[in-house]
Image (spheres, rainbow, N blue to C red):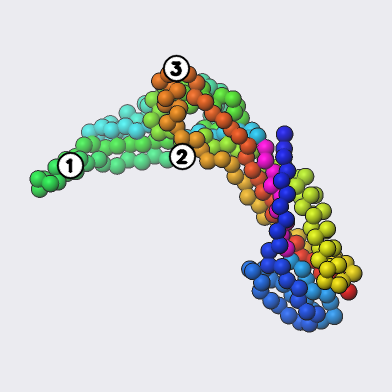
Amino acid sequence: MKTHLFTAMATGLALVAASPAIAQQGGSTVAATAGQGPILSFSVSEEVRARPDQATIGAGVTALAPTAVEAIRTNAAAMDKLIAAAKKRGIKAEDIQTSGISLSPQYDYNNRGDGQPPRFLGYQVTNSVRATTPNIEDIGPLLDALVAAGGTNIDGPWFAMKDPDAMLVGARGTAIKAAEAKAADYARLAGYRGAELVSITEGGSFGGPQPMPFGRAMDALEAKASTPVEPGRVANTLTLNFQYRLLR
């Protein structure tokens, strides 16, 4: 179910005298030419909130070994188990993507106070993937399965809409109607007979709640209970920038 919240805001609102001119007001450019009415510029924003229909989880493993080759091999075996666990929970292969691999030497610096060089510990490899699923209800069990399979680095989940633009179809109509009423009101207040649309440009932002911390997931796993995950709603905001010419 979608809920629409409307916010109208004037950004760089300006009326320019009917003579050749260009002016900057609040980051917006307004202009008028001789014999024509001034240009009115403003923005209208429309926010739409809806329950997300997909989620992404980051998971990875870290391995430490005396040599780089051994560290890579150990990590690869662990990652195979992690990816297999994700697939077993219904994640498709095309929805699992490697997000980062790092290999670096590790040292112990605790003995630096004795004037000794740092002690070499070995090579550390970290490998991470991101898995995306439309099954929101399975996020908790999926997190538990990834940890049980050896996952030590867990991020997310991040909730989103598969087609965020589809949420904004109705919002565009609402924004345009609001803009028409706003332009007509300013024309009346400024002593003009009306306003005609000159241009519309679109912007917007798509976001959602911050990923939940995974500390609760570890506690739930130890208690042999599924990790609680609440998807809430994600918010998409449409912003339309309008220019109207005021008619004499």
Residue 165 in view here = no
Among the two numbered marks 1 and 3 on one chain, the one whose residue lies closer to the N terminus = 1
Among the two numbered marks 1 and 2 on one chain, the one whose residue lies closer to the N terminus = 2
Looking at the rendered structure, the secondary structure element under dot 3 is: loop
Q: Which residue is mark 1?
A: 110
Residue 120 found in image quarter: top left
Question: Residue lying farthest front?
Answer: 189
Task: Look at 73% across and 80% down and name the residue there.
Answer: 21
Residue 1: numbered disc: none
User: Residue 49 colored magenta?
Assistant: yes
At label 1, the amino acid type is Asn
Report the magenta stretch's main SS. Answer: strand
Residue 118 found in image quarter: top left
Across and down, in percent, residue 44 comes to 73, 56
Looking at the rendered structure, the secondary structure element under dot 1 is: loop
User: Residue 220 colored magenta?
Assistant: no
Q: Which residue is mark 2?
A: 99
184 horizontally vs 27: left or right: right
At label 3, the amino acid type is Lys
Separation (CA) of disc 1 from disc 3? 38 Å
Task: Look at 77% across and 68% down and name the residue there.
Answer: 40
Residue 17 in view here = yes
183 or 116: nearer the eye?
A: 183
Task: Look at 54% across and 28% down and name the residue there.
Answer: 229
Q: Which residue is mark 3?
A: 224
CA neighbours of label 3 inside 10 A, class few (<14), some (14 to 19), many (20+):
few
89 horizontally vs 121: left or right: right
Task: Look at 67% across and 37% down and name the residue there.
Answer: 50
- Bounds of the magenta segment: 42-50
Closest to the camera, between mark 1 and mark 2, is 1
